[in-house]
Image (cartoon, rainbow, N blue to C red):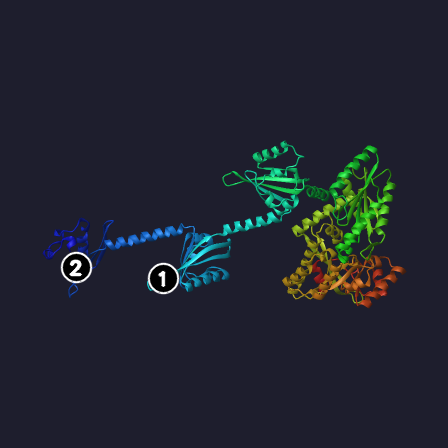
Amino acid sequence: NRRFHLNNGSFRKPMDTLNFPDYFEDIEMRLNKTLQTGVAENVIIKPSSQETYNVFITPIFNSRERITGAIIVIIDNSELVLAHERIEKSQEQLLSIMNNSLAVIALKDNAGRYEFVNARFEEVFGLHADEVVGKTDLQIFERETAKQFRDKDLDTMRTLSPLETIDEFTLPLGKVTLNSVRFPIFDAEGTIKSICTQATDISKEKHANEQLRLAGKIFERTSEAILVTDANEKIVTANETFTEVTGYTTQELTGNAPSMLQSSSHSDDFYRGIRASLSERGFWQGEAEIKVKSGSSVTMWLTVNAVKGGDGDIVNYVAAFSDVNEIKDMQRRIEYLATHDELTGLPNRAVLLERLELMVGNAKRAEQLCAVLFIDLDKFKPVNDNLGHKVGDLLLKQVTKRINKCIRDTDMLARLGGDEFVAIVSAARVDEIDEIAKRIITQVETEFQVANHQIAISASLGVAVYPNDGITSDVLLHHADEAMYHAKSLGRGQYQYFTARMMEKAQARVQIEARLKSALQERQFSLVYQPQYDIASNAIVGMEALLRIANDEQDITRAAEFIDVAEKANLIDAIGFHALELVAFDLKMAMQKGISLPRVSVNLSGKQLLTSDFTKRFEQLLSRTSLPAEAFKFEISERDIQKGEKRIFHRLQSLKSMGAVICIDDFGIHQSAVAQLQQCGASEMKLSRQIIEQPDDASEQLLRAYIDVANVLGMTVVADQVETEEQMDYLVSVGCELAQGFVFSAPVTFDNMLEKLDR
């Protein structure tokens, strides 16, 4: 009341006659409002930054609930508000200091829940405060990191004193190392209420120290001799290699000038040149004579670098000395490997083409012949696969020696890789080239003795002659390659000259390969099926899926016309498995319709089986289609079986163990051993067309022998490509019971096949 000069004499006086300050002028208006509405009023009045008043106007009611007056209470809160403002300002300043601190700061309650983390904490841990506050370490971090933090918090609480530790842990952002101090915060009763952690991120410093230690180890253990001087060219240190090379101890070197190592074989201009290069470019490199303690000189490859400090001034010079002879040997080795085959020591393709260009030029000037002999070893792969690469490498070395004996010193033999060699020879006549080719074939066919193994291989040669078969090295090499493939197709162990007909075939292969790639991409392959019959009952007992290319403009619709190209172009795996998927789709469709089908034969290439995941993909296909493996019969050619490839046998056995039947296709041409038939798990042999095409006494005896072998092994015999009634009668007479061919049915679509089965 004294604040507003109110006393007993103020009673019953109107409000506007009282001595209120101007800033209370709306109290009368608020009073009238309360008297009219009966609603209390509460207002804060702040006339200046130093003054704050709370005004409460409360209505007074009589016993009849009528307003008879009001009580006005004015409270001076100035000191209290100022105190709160000072506290808030202090808190804001403290928060600003903590958030701008380079230290990580965190506050946890005694249960381990975060109460506060600063901006540096967010930066180091990659977390926002909202993700941390109210949670424990175990809710935020990996278990190992959380346990580390909690254990150290508990140690601090047990000791009731600050605890300094090194905290190392791994976060998604990387490995972090903190130098941490934890200390307890007590309440008025002396009980720990919080744990405060302040930590400095020393990850970079630790990494730098590790790098320094690593550099020190490298400095001491490197094979190079290293010398370090200060900016005034006084020796500071040298590594152990340097002391070994020069004979000086570190103590003898330290404090001296590098001039103690200068050799009289260099002039003053030589050393002035080194200093000039260091001044202008910061480094110098070259050969130098170094005088050692004994007084003699050694030739070294010297590299000197000027090391600058943060201010750009030179602080050290580092000189590295390498054995120049080792460097030159390494250069010669690199040059040799760039031009030669490491295993055989023969020139490589680059040197071959360069030398062939020279020989072609010489042949042109002398009007002579120049020939390229492309040599491919037959039956080398089984040696590698069955006896190991070490034996294969030794065999290639022996082959190299033998072929080199067949050519003259003026000729050249190169290895292209694998089992492919190329000889380039100059000759006056074609018969000279013939003689060399024959000698090579004879030498390679002669049995090899390698690591206690008797090894028999052969060679197929393709020959291209300048100028008839080409006038450039690339063309001659390509044509010789084509001729070699032709020699292989004719039975191996022979040589063939390049002809224009081979070029036509090569071009046709290129076109077929392009067509196959397009058909794969556009999904233009389709299937037809040829039924297999029991000859006696004329009942369908099986069917073979045959691949075709739909809408083919190049007339290569039959698989027999493109399989060879597909194998050479490494497309056979993709095409073969696509065919298997098409068969599975047809079988699943029939199964869904409740149609029972005989086993379906699918052709396999040996190359398909050599892919490591073929059986796995087949299992996955069965799983996707819910088909049993027993629905499939896999036909593989006798040619692939005869190679004796163990991986092929193993994977055929795997298919058999799954429930599929294995059939040897085109049987009787390559004369497989009985052991190979057993190794591959075959239970069926399909006779080659050549055996039944023109029956005679010799072929009949052979056919009966095959059927007898099949009976002994428990195998079924199927005749393929039977086209006449006479052939069918002949098969019955020798005891062959199953057959397929045009005499029974041409290949038909799947729908037509279902109709045949229904009939």
Disc 1 secondary structure class: strand
Whole-percent x and y of residue 376? Answer: 79, 49
Of circles 1 and 2, the one toward us is 1
Left or right: 612 with respect to 364? left
| Residue that label 1 marks | 186
Seen in the picture, residue 559 relative to 538 is either above or below; the reply is above
662 or 422, which is in the foreground? Answer: 422
Residue 83 lies in quadrant: bottom left
Q: Residue 70's mark?
A: 2
Disc 2 secondary structure class: strand
Q: Is residue 748 visible?
A: no
Q: Residues within 10 Å of mark 2 (few under 14, many from 20)?
A: some
Say which amino acid is labelled 1: Phe
Whole-percent x and y of residue 327? Answer: 68, 42
Farthest-out residue, top: 269
Left or right: 617 with respect to 424? left
Say which amino acid is labelled 2: Ala
Q: Residues within 10 Å of mark 1 (few under 14, many from 20)?
A: few
